[in-house]
Image (cartoon, rainbow, N blue to C red):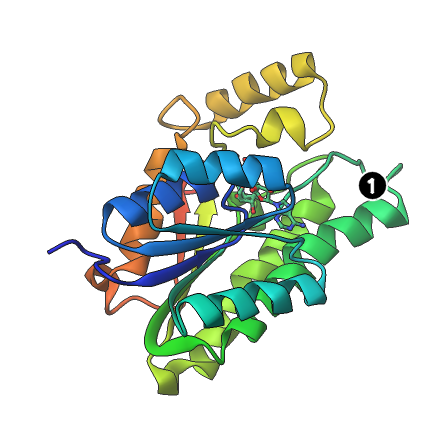
Amino acid sequence: MKKLEGKVAVITGGSSGIGLATAKRFVEDGAHVVITGRREKELKEAAALIDSNVTTVVGDVSRLDDLDRLYAVVKEKHGHIDILFANAGAGTIAPLAVATEAHFDQTFDVNVKGLFFTVQKALPLLRDGGSVILTSSVSNVLGLPGFSAYAASKAAVRNFARAWTLELKDRNIRVNAMSPGPIETPALETTTGLTPEQARQAAAQFASQIPMGRRGKPDEVAAAVMFLASDESSYITGLDLAVDGGMAQV
Ligand code: NAD
């Protein structure tokens, strides 16, 4: 029997990178996935890659109306959620001296407010005994010049896992954070605001700071999320699982 046979999983930011790799992995392991992202075209392409047992809902997690629409679709199609992977997020470069209010608000609107309400609004559909996984980042414990708002937003996410573990324990819902180190996804090139050359340099610099000497692959992160989603981690809650080649562990 597959580890997620018949389970219903919602994955925000499922059209690309870590979310897409996890959606593929969940379906291979027997789940039905509902994935969100902001752009219809990318979502449809992702669904084609996942191939089966996938529903797409276009939406921005920082817009509460969009979250209501997402969960209305989940309710109609499946009636409940077993696994919630609150993964959508992004960070753009902006050193403290030049960062704008718009930069700060955008970072916290998506990574903190969006994730907060992604989980709150899922609660009525989440089955008792379910698993919630929050994508944080190893920057939640590291100083990352140029990305201080992003790192602080991910520290907030890490703390949500602590408080929600206690708030949801009576429903046997486990809540864990998962913190990637630098991973080979489109994010570095497409969403950080770095030029292609700066992105290349940043990737090389990250690799030099990682004991394993390389960036991780989205599939390697998906394997860790799979562990937290499945009963293999039945006695694990409130954790921050780093998937970082040792970057923030030594
Ligand atoms: P990605 O750019 O490949 O994918 C990000 C996904 O999130 C996309 O599907 C995008 O559509 C979605 N998204 C972004 N903003 C959204 C919004 N407002 N509403 C709905 N969807 C939105 O990036 P990724 O590297 O796979 O990142 C996934 C998560 O991992 C993010 O939370 C990111 O902060 C975190 N992370 C990534 C790395 C890394 O090195 N790639 C490291 C640490 C943490």
Q: Quadrant of the N terminus?
A: bottom left
Mark 1 Cα shell of 10 Å, populated few (<14), some (14-19), many (≥20):
few
Q: Is residue 42 left or right of residue 223?
A: right
- Residue at the (30%, 51%) spot, across then down: 226
Q: Amino acid at mark 1?
A: Leu
Q: Is residue 146 left or right of residue 239?
A: right
Residue beneath disc 1: 96
Q: Nearer the viewer, residue 105 or 51?
A: 51
- Residue at the (44%, 40%) spot, across then down: 47
- Residue at the (59%, 32%) spot, across then down: 187
- The vertical placement of 76 against 227, above or below, is below
Residue extending furthest toward the bottom: 170
Q: Quadrant of residue 42?
A: top right
Residue 116 visible from this viewpoint: no
Ligand 1 sits in quadrant? top right
Q: Quadrant of residue 95?
A: top right
Residue 156 percent coordinates (x, y): 61, 61
- The vertical placement of 93 against 154, above or below, is above
Count the marks.
1
Q: Is residue 2 left or right of residue 160?
A: left
Residue 81 percent coordinates (x, y): 40, 69
Q: Nearer the viewer, residue 167 or 49?
A: 49
- Residue at the (53%, 25%) spot, across then down: 206
Label 1: element kind: loop
Residue 91 percent coordinates (x, y): 67, 41
Residue 142 percent coordinates (x, y): 57, 44
Q: Nearer the viewer, residue 108 or 64?
A: 64
Q: Nearer the viewer, residue 213 or 71?
A: 71
